[in-house]
Amino acid sequence: MNFENNRSGGKKSSKKARSNRVRSIVFYLVLILIAVGLFVGLQPTYRTKNVAFSDLVKDVKAGKVAKIVETGNDLHVYMKDKNGKAEEYPSKISRIPTGASASEQGLDLSKVEYEVTPPDNTSDIAWNIAAIVVPIALMFVLFAWMMRQAGSMNNSNMGFGKSRAKLVDANKSDTKFSDIAGNDNAKQDLTEVVDFLKHPRKFVSLGARIPKGVLLVGPPGTGKTMMARAVAGEAGVPFFTVSGSEFVEMFVGVGASRVRDLFDKAKKSAPCIIFIDEIDAIGRRRGSGLGGGHDEREQTLNQILVEMDGFEKDQNVIVLAATNRADVLDPALLRPGRFDRRVNVTLPERQDRLAILKVHFKNKPCADDVDLDALAAKTAGMSGADLMNIANEAAIRAARFNRKQINNSDVTEALEKIAIGPERKNSIMRDKDKEITAYHEGGHALVAEVLPDSDNVHKVTIIPRGGTGGVTWTIPEYDRPYTTIAEYKDELAKAMGGRIAEEVVYGRDHITSGASSDLKSATNTAREMIIELGMGTKLRDQSFHEDEGGLMMDRIQREKPYSEKTQEEIDTEVAQLLDEATNRARAVITTNRDYLEKLKDALIKEETLEADEVAEILKGATLPEEAKQY
C-alpha cells in the first residue's frame, strides 16, 4: 500500500526540496570552479618583474633588451635570450613616467624593436557592466526567494489541518504477540481483535459487530503501545499512530480538522488500525466550565465521537487508544459503540518479569553468576520498562569497567540504582551525621524485622542514595494481589521507626528532619486506608473517594462526597492510625535497644548491610506484647 500520511509526506517533501536546493548549489559552484579553472588555464603562464624606468633605460643602452611593447603607460619588455633573440613572453614591465613620451625621457628606441599597441579596456567595461548587472541580479534572486518562502508558508497553512499521524505499513509492522513477554490475559483479549481484522466475514455472517474502539489501560511502561503494534503485526494491516496531544493546537478547529483527515485516510486504507496514545490529553471529561463547547480540546473530542459513530458496517477500522488515567475520560468515549472494550495491561507478575528479563538479557553476554530468577523476585511492582532499564544499566556498568560480560555485581548495582537511586559516594558526612543516619535506618530495619507482617529487609545502607541520607530497602516475600490491615499497619510502624529511633536515643527535642519523606508516606498510606479502602474503626466499610482527575474549576465547583463532620472523623481516624504506628515502633525499639546499638555499630563500620547480615545481628530480637497486632 503506497499511501503516505501528511506528516511523513510533508517531512519527505521538505527533505527532498532541501536536497534539490543543495544539489543546485553544488552544481552552480562546480560550474563556477570550471569557468575559473578555464580562465586561469587560458592565461599565459609567464611571470613579469616590475622594474624602474631608469633601469630599463640602462638595459636598453647595454643591449640587453630585444623588444618593447608599449600599451598605454606600460612598457612590456622582452629580454634577449642566449641566442640573442627576443624572449617568447615579456619578463619585465615598466611604467613611463608622466609628463613626456618614453623616447623624450631618455629611452633609446633605435637599439630595440619598439611596438605601440592600444590598451585593452575590456576589463574596465566588464567591471562597469558588473556594477550595474550584479545588484539587479541580487535583487531579482532576493525577490524570487521571498516569493518562494511565501509560497511554502501558504502550502504549510493549507496543510495545517491535516493529520500528523504516522503510518506504519503492513509489511513493516513485524511486532508479534510472541515478542511480548507476560500479560497473557491482555494478549488473549486482543486476539479477538486480530481475528476481526483478518476474518471479518466470519463474524459478520453470524451477526457479530466489529468493535470500533479498544481502550488499553495500565500503568506507564507496561507495554500498551507495543501491544497495539502487535495487533497490527498479527493482523497484517496498516497501523496509524498518533499522540493525543498532536491534535490540539492554538487555533480552534484545527484538532477537529485533523481528526476528520485521519479517519478519512484510515477508511481509504481499511482494514487498518488507528492508535491514539495518551488519549486522556483530548478525551478528558467535558463540562468543566472552562471554555464551554468552544474549547479546542472539547471540539476535538466531539469530532472523535462523531467519527466513531460514523463508521460504516463494512469498514474494518479499529481504534486502539492507550491511557493510564481511564478515570478522567469522558463517559461518552466509554459507552457501547465507541471504546466498548477495555483491556487492562497490568504490571508483570514474577514469572512474567522473568520472561521479560530473559528477553532483555538475550543479546547481552552474562557471566554464570547472573541469576535472573532471583532478580525477578526482587523486582516486584516494576514495569517492563523498568526491567529493560535495569538490563541496560547493567550493560553500561560492565562496559564502564571494561568487562566483556555482565556479572552479578553489575545487575545488583543496576537494580539498586533504579529502585532506590544512585549512590552519592562523594558526599562527605560528619561522624555525628553518620551516627544519626545509622540510628535512623537501624530503627526502620529493626521494626521491619520484628513485626510479623512487614516486608522483609533486603538491604540497609547509610550511604546517601538519590535524595536520601540512607536507605532501608524492604521487599515482599512474594507478589501480593491484596494487602491486609495488619500488613498496612506494620508498614506504617516501619515508616515511623526511623523517627522514633532518633527520639529514643537523642530525646524528643533533638529529632531531625530526616524523617520528612517517611512522615509524608505514612500519612498518605493512612489516608488511603480510611478514605479509599474502608479500613478505619468508626468509618470501616465506607469509601469516600474523591475524583482528582478533573480540571481545577471542575474540582472547585464540585462538593466533596462527605460532610464536614465526616471530614473531622477521617482526620481523627488518620491520627489514630499514625499514633498507633508510633507507639508500636517505640515499643519495639525500646524493648530491643541493645540490638539497635549493635545494628548502628555495624552500619557505621560497614556502611551497607545485606539481608543475611541484618538477620544475624537482629537474631533474638523479640516482639513486645504492646506491639502485637490487634
Image (cartoon, rainbow, N blue to C red):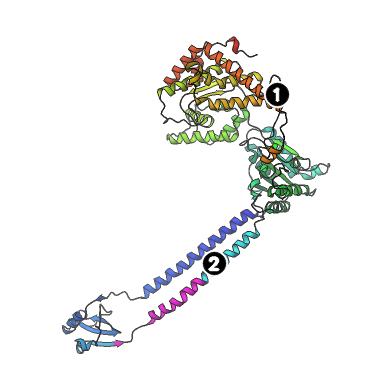
Residue 220, image x, y percentages: 62, 36
Mark 2 surroundings within 10 Å by alpha-carbon count, few (fewer than 14), some (14 through 19), many (20 or more): few
Q: Which mark is residue 145?
A: 2
Q: Secondary structure at mark 1?
A: loop
Q: Which mark is residue 37?
A: none
Left or right of 621, for residue 557: right
Q: Which mark is residue 534?
A: 1
Residue lying farthest to the left in this orientation: 62
Confirm whether residue 394 shows in the render.
yes
Q: Which residues are magenta?
A: 116-139
Magenta span: chief secondary structure: helix
Query: Quarter of the image holding residue 534?
Result: top right
CA separation, marks 2 and 1? 71 Å
Left or right of 313, for residue 473: left
Is residue 47 magenta-colored? no
Residue 357, image x, y percentages: 57, 32
Is residue 120 magenta-colored? yes
Residue lying farthest to the front in this orientation: 564
Query: Quarter of the image holding residue 190?
Result: top right
Residue 114, image x, y percentages: 25, 87
Q: Secondary structure at mark 2?
A: helix
Residue 518, image x, y percentages: 55, 25
Q: State the residue in front, 43 or 476.
A: 476
Q: Say what amino acid the circle numbered 1 marks.
A: Gly
| Sequence-wise first label, 2 or 1 | 2
Q: For the point 52% across and 72% down, which residue is it?
A: 140
Mark 1 surroundings within 10 Å by alpha-carbon count, few (fewer than 14), some (14 through 19), many (20 or more): some
From this view, report whether residue 188 is shown above or below residue 585: below
